[in-house]
Amino acid sequence: MLIKRASDIQPSEITDEKLFMNRRSFMAKASAAAVGGALMAGPVKAASEDDDLTPWETVTGYNNFYEFGTGKADPAKNATKFTTDEWSVKVTGDVEEERTWDLEEMIAGFTVEERIYRHRCVEGWSMVVPWNGFPLGDLIKRLKPTSEAKYVSFTTLYDVRRMPGQMSPVLPWPYVEGLRLDEAMNPLTLMVTGVYGKKLPPQNGAPIRLIIPWKYGFKGGKSIVRINFSKRQPMTTWNEAIPREYGFYANVNPEVDHPRWTQATERRLGEFFRRDTLMFNGYTEEVESLYAGMNLRKYY
Ligand code: MTE
């Protein structure tokens, strides 16, 4: 069992002393990560005991967010002025009622948990990150897709003035990612509003982004402004840009290499030696039933 409720975790089990020694001040900051009307709960651990947290400086300083540039340090540098006040999210497609939600109203009353997740990028690096968020499944129940809906997609803001990287044709804009509805409803799939107990910084996808810990990081769209439910598998940005290299499923799988490099090992940022990549990034128990009978070489 990889997920623990806060009450099951002994302080001695938690590895990062700097973060957790002063639990009270941490919890005070944690409430800041609960944007809008969401409430804050204690931590839920979903990484193993030997996974040390990746430091804040790395989590917020080494990013992929092409809307702010393609270098790893670009988003932190170029997104400092990005503001997310009065954010709203359009909900469209196969839903009972299509409408635009104020973010605060959309997430009001949800309990924001801390989830310590392994975060594996398709490029071969990984981190361990204490995200703050709530299960996407809770939100989907509130948005009420129809029984016809089989997929859900997430669109990032498109605003060239605020996201200068969109002036470059490096990707087809806006950035869109999607999931099968049963993947979206899996309790591990997290809508993230904070990290390390603080509000999500712009470079990590403020004010709201997705994290699907058993998939490569590119599935986790940032700064979401639209959620669309559909009967058919949606077009997704990386799959559209380079279909041979980036599939729709993008499950972490050490046995299926990227056409240009291995996926069998990864470099945990801050470590020297590469380590073995785990099937489904180590979350097999929770997610393998989603793919029963599927050929994961074909559906990569
Ligand atoms: N979302 C948008 N809108 N634009 C991006 O370039 N990069 C993806 C994903 N979400 C990306 C995005 C990739 S490749 C990864 S690995 C993760 O965000 C990185 O998230 P992090 O910077 O918070 O670690």
Image (spheres, helix red, strand yellow):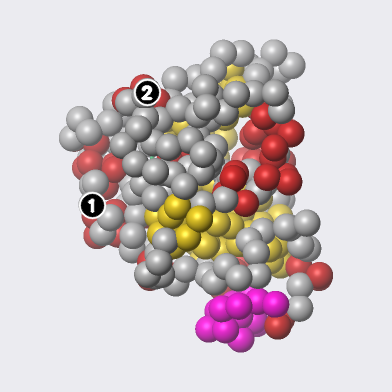
* Magenta part of the chain: 13-27
Which SS class for mark 1?
loop
Q: Which residue is denoted by mark 2 in the rendering? A: 243
Q: Residue at x 33, y 60 (%)?
A: 62
* In-image side of 44 versus 130 (left or right): right
Vertically, is 167 above or below 112? above
Mark 2 or mark 1: whose residue is earlier in sequence: 1
Residue at horizontal 57%, vertical 68%? 51
Residue at 31% x, 25% y is 241
Report if residue 220 lies within the magenta region: no
Residue 39 visible to an observer of this rendering: no
Q: Quadrant of residue 184?
A: top right
Q: Main secondary structure of the magenta part?
A: helix
Q: Depth check: 205 or 212 in front? A: 212
Q: On the image, numbered disc 1 is attached to which residue?
A: 71
Number of numbered discs: 2
